[in-house]
Amino acid sequence: MTTVELVSPFVLEYAYKRSTGPVIGRFLTALRAGRIEGVRTATGRVLCPPVEYDPETGEDIVDFVEVGPEGTVTTWTWVAEPEPGQPLSEPFAYALVKLDGADTAMLHALKCGKDALVTGMRVRAVFAAERSGMITDLAYFQPADLPAPELVPVPAEHPVTRFKAPVHAEYTVAAGATTAEFLRGILRKELNGRRCPSCDKIYIPPRGSCPLCGVRTSEVVPLAQKGTVTTFSIIRIPFEGQVLEPPYAAAHVLLDGADVPLLHIVGDCDVDDVRMGMRVEAVWVEDLQPTLASVRYFRPIDEPDATYESFKEHV
Amino acid sequence: MALRDVHIAGFAQLPNSHDLDDYDEAEMVQEITERALADAGLRREDVGFTCSGSNDYVMGRPFSFTMAIDGLGAWPPIRESHVEMDGAWAMYEAYVRLQHGDVDVALVYCFGKSSLGSVDKVHTYELDPYSLAPLQVDPHSLAAMQARMLLEQGLITEAELAHIACRARRDGNKNPNAPHSDEADADALLAQPYVREPLRAHDLPTRTDGAACIVLRVGGGGPRIRGIAHIMDQHQPGSRDLTDAVSARQALEAAGGADGVTVAELHAPYTTQVAVLKRAMGLDDEVAINPSGGAIPACTPMVAGLVRIGEAAMAVRHGAPAAIGHATSGSLLQHNLVCVLEAE
Ligand SMILES: [Zn+2]
């Protein structure tokens, strides 16, 4: 089984919303209405996109100024193969555009034939038909000499105060040598820990280094498939992503010989019978996979409960 | 009050490589901290303050730095801090902490993996969340817009960029801690297509996995920190001069200046940024730029900056009278840290 590549896809997502504050809120409210507003500083500079304070002096900005919708490209690059989530799905340019009336440039997408792209070209903002108060309400810039689509009005009762800013990132996680060795053991119905050469503690799941001593663990130690429930919790309510049917018992099981308990499930008994000190053993699934879920659960065995003294160091 | 003299007593890095699949966070940290302490001739018990740099979005794990502490042997509990930045900023915090006067040794480490996901995508989340992040503008596109300004203003040529790339690859191939890059002459590189016009593949960083550790010590010998400073420019790329790096120049001045400097390790992931930093910091041709190859052949997120300081320290250890270690954060050289090191 050493050819099994122990990697797993992983998606990290956060469904964040962001609040805007009054300055950015006004900018986004204007974008939703199909206008671009910059801010004027005490020194008379007009900044677009706006910032909340003068970046040079830290003073409050003075007022708002309508800028654009035309402007001049100050630099650009060509995106031949857009990624999902970028402003346009066809090849496009990112450009810095200094809008008429502004002293700073705004970064945005530029929809334009590649051959027509040139620094200094005149462009015009094109607004999305559906607008909700985000920078993407300005859909893209296009060459100023092309006819602009007519602005579609959108209802706009309330000023923009927040918008959706989700995070989505995809990963391929590798198990790492120590965890991979543990997971391959599971394919042989083995529960293998690792021993610290300095303090002799045995960790399961194994760790590559001892968190107490800061040295590499060295020796692989096969552990018994029996152990003691050191503490537990009965899960009685459903939650998103739940695999088991409540009620069920999640427990810390201290395998005989191990120094840290393993978080797992106690099954084959009434949840109300689960107790500290209860003796249990591993029950394996039929179709072994390189995951700790190949242990279906731990079930009670016919042994007297362990005394609290015998496991109190591990609670 | 006079500042305490702080020295770089030890340095270690894992080889920057395309993947470090065998190591988890704790294992990376265990190995580099053990090696750096050995390099410094110190033990874990000697460390009075520990600070790390890493990023959860890079590692794809919330609170990944808390798991990494398992590599430290943090028992009994230790004084510890973390920055969600390159390890160079963790070193800055540790330097300041040593100025408090009650501890004399600080351990600084960092780790990052590009192999887990898309670092380019992660970088889009570091941009202004209102006006930039929703546009998902990737770092290569940003760098390409900076490059066009440099080229169109006559500050550099594409051929000069190719020469910077050739040298970075050649020097990187001599560095055992950088992955191998295929070497080619500048003409061959210039015949390649654009990735983001006007940048070609050779202008872009090679994304790597890695980890590094520096041991700081008050007194005790080794390269002495003349000064360390970090300064941040405006965020919006359209509101600053992208052909310059004002904050890098200011940070160099605040860190004591470049007198006697013969080596500069610059955290410039793009060929263009080597040129921008060199000019912004006023480094002449007498200064060897990035003898390690720099951050083009080996660009490990959250690590490449601290490695620059470590490489600068090794240059001083091996005879340079003074050296610059530079780190950057944010996009397009927005935020720059300079550490000037000198022989005692
Ligand atoms: Zn131990």
Image (cartoon, rainbow, N blue to C red):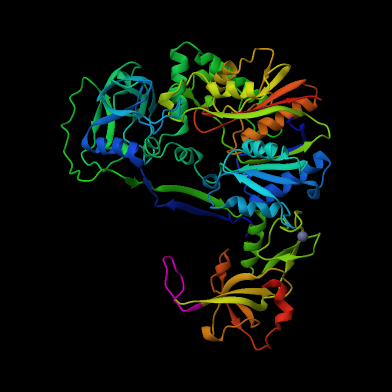
Q: Is residue A230 above or below residue A212?
A: below
A116 up-or-down from A233: above or below = above
Looking at the rendering, which quadrant does residue A1 occupy? bottom right
Q: Position of residue A248 (x, y in %)?
A: 50, 78
The furthest residue to the top: B154
B135 left or right, relative to A307 = left
Q: Quadrant of the C terminus of chain A?
A: bottom right
Q: Is residue B182 rendered magenta in the image?
A: no
Task: Please identify the dominant SS of the magenta region.
Answer: loop
Q: Position of residue A159 (x, y in %)?
A: 25, 43
Q: Is residue A101 above or below residue A18?
A: above
Report whether residue B193 is seen.
no
Task: Decide which of B113, A286 is in the foreground and name it.
Answer: B113
For the residue pair A28 and B162, the one nearer the viewer reads as: A28
Q: Position of residue B328 (x, y in %)?
A: 57, 30
Q: Residue at x 58, y 67 (%)?
A: A292
Question: Splitting the image into 4 quarters, where does residue A38 fall?
Answer: top left
In what quadrant does ligand 1 lie? bottom right
Q: Is residue A264 left or right of residue A93?
A: right
Q: In the visual, does B6 lie left or right of A75?
A: right
Residue occupying the point 68% across, 59% down: A207
Task: Give me the residue at 68% from left, 88% from top.
Answer: A303
Region of the chain picked out in magenta, as a range: A237-248
Total count of labels: 0
In this view, the residue in front, A192 or B315, is B315
Q: Position of residue A275 (x, y in %)?
A: 60, 83
Instruction: Give the left or right position of residue A256, taking residue A7 as reference.
Output: right
Q: Is residue A86 above or below residue A65?
A: below
Residue A35 can be seen in this image: yes
